[in-house]
Image (cartoon, rainbow, N blue to C red):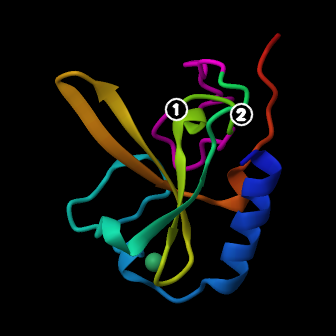
Amino acid sequence: MNAATLLEFARAAEARTTAPCTCTKTPLDGWQSQPLSLDETQFREIGTLLPEDYAEPTFSEYLPGKTTYWSADAPIAPRYFPYNRCSVWECALCGRLYLHYTEGGGYFVDRRIRAVKAGLIEDVPLPP
Ligand SMILES: [Zn+2]
């Protein structure tokens, strides 16, 4: 799924979800280690943001201004790290969308999750 598709899904999800849900108990506006209280089985994967050309996804991050990796207002730029490694999850109970990936490798593995906000999705091309 590319930025345009993700945006379409995110807008549709935001239009139909207003009520709180078990998935909104912990704020996930920025990246978080997946809370233990979160029941993974209530999500279904509806796609991934992995590049379709099988190229090794970049580790470059797109963080304009004062945003950092952890910022709640950091843009969601699907071609950049870590978005280019993410699965797109939909909460089966409320339809909200989340991004999910596993950070690290070897001894350090951390499952991270972030809520998708349509307003933060930016279709930024990679530098040549
Ligand atoms: Zn939910």
Q: Quadrant of residue 104?
A: top left
Residue, disc 2: 52
Q: Splitting the image into 4 quarters, where does residue 50 fall?
A: top right
In the image, the segment drawn in magenta is 55-77
| Residue 65 in magenta stretch | yes
State the image coordinates of residue 32 (x, y, percent, origin top left).
36, 49
Q: What residue sits 53% from the left and 35% below the top?
A: 85
Q: Which numbered disc flags the more N-terminal residue, 1 or 2? A: 2
Q: Is residue 50 left or right of residue 15?
A: left
- Residue that carries the numbered disc 1 in the rendered image: 68
Is 106 left, or right, of 123 in this rendering? left
Instruction: Say which residue appears at 66% left-offset and 19% top-offset.
Output: 55
SS assignment for the magenta stretch, majority: loop
Q: Secondary structure at mark 1?
A: loop
Note whether 123 is above or below 80 in the view shown: below
> Residue at point 36% right, 33% down?
103
